[in-house]
Image (spheres, rainbow, N blue to C red):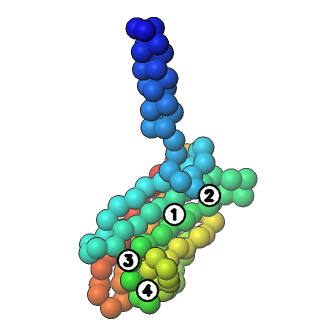
């Protein structure tokens, strides 16, 4: 009986260890994913994915309100690689910008910045790869 309890406990510990090490949904090995809160009620996610052509950059803002216009900038190592506007869309009231960055020697720093045109709410996400 004690042996069976030990086996069950070990199996449970293994499952929890593997589950705890799992990457965020949609992320693969080597990806860097950062999330955070904006100055209001919105949230942001910045995902960096290395591939053979450079670094795929995905910057998402979720305000839970459809139809908002946001000004968006993405910087790589301090240099702007994207500037534009995006509108939040349904059903979640979010938008995503995808852009390809350059994979330079050493560490690359990325910054996504979005400003709500109507409210001034600010979202700033930073990540390094």
CB contact under 8 Å: marks 2 and 1: yes
Which residue lies under the disc numbered 3?
Answer: 63
Q: Looking at the image, which residue is at 38% across and 78% down? A: 64
Q: CA distance from mark 2 to mark 1?
A: 10 Å
Give the label, 2 or 1, closer to the camera.
2
Q: Kindly identify the residue that appears in the image at 35 percent across and 61 percent down.
A: 36
- Of residues 12 and 86, the one drawn nearer to the viewer in this rendering: 12
Gap in angstroms between the C-alphas marked 1 and 4 = 29 Å
Mark linked to residue 76: 1
When asked about the image quadrant of residue 57, the answer is bottom right
Q: Name the residue located 31 percent from the left edge and 65 percent from the top edge.
A: 37
Instruction: Tell me if residue 78 can be seen.
Output: no
Q: Could you say which is closer to the camera, residue 113 or residue 34?
A: 34
Specify whether 71 is left or right of 23.
Answer: left
Please state which of the two labelled residues, at mark 3 or mark 1, is closer to the viewer: 3
Query: In the image, residue 21 lies at what x, y percent?
Result: 48, 37
Crowd band around label 1 with a 10 angstrom C-alpha radius: few (<14), some (14–19), many (20+): many
Please rate how many residues cluster around mark 3, counting C-alpha atoms within 10 Å: few if below 14, some from 14 to 19, many from 20. Answer: many
Residue ID for mark 4: 66
Disc number placed over residue 1 in the picture, else none:
none
**Quadrant of image for the N terminus:** top left
Do the numbered discs 2 and 4 sit on residues whose CB atoms are within 8 Å?
no
């Amino acid at each position: 009986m004690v042996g069976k309890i030990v086996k069950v406990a070990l199996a449970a510990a293994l499952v929890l260890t593997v589950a705890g090490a799992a990457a965020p949904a949609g992320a693969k090995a080597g990806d860097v994913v950062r999330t955070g809160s904006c100055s209001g009620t919105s949230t942001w996610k910045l995902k960096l994915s290395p591939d053979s052509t450079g670094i795929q950059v995905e910057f998402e803002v979720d305000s839970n309100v459809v139809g908002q216009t946001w000004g968006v900038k993405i910087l790589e190592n301090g240099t702007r690689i994207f500037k534009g506007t995006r509108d939040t869309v349904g059903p979640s009231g979010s938008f995503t910008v995808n852009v390809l960055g350059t994979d330079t020697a050493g560490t690359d720093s990325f910054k996504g910045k979005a400003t709500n045109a109507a409210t001034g709410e600010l979202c700033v996400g930073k990540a390094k790869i």
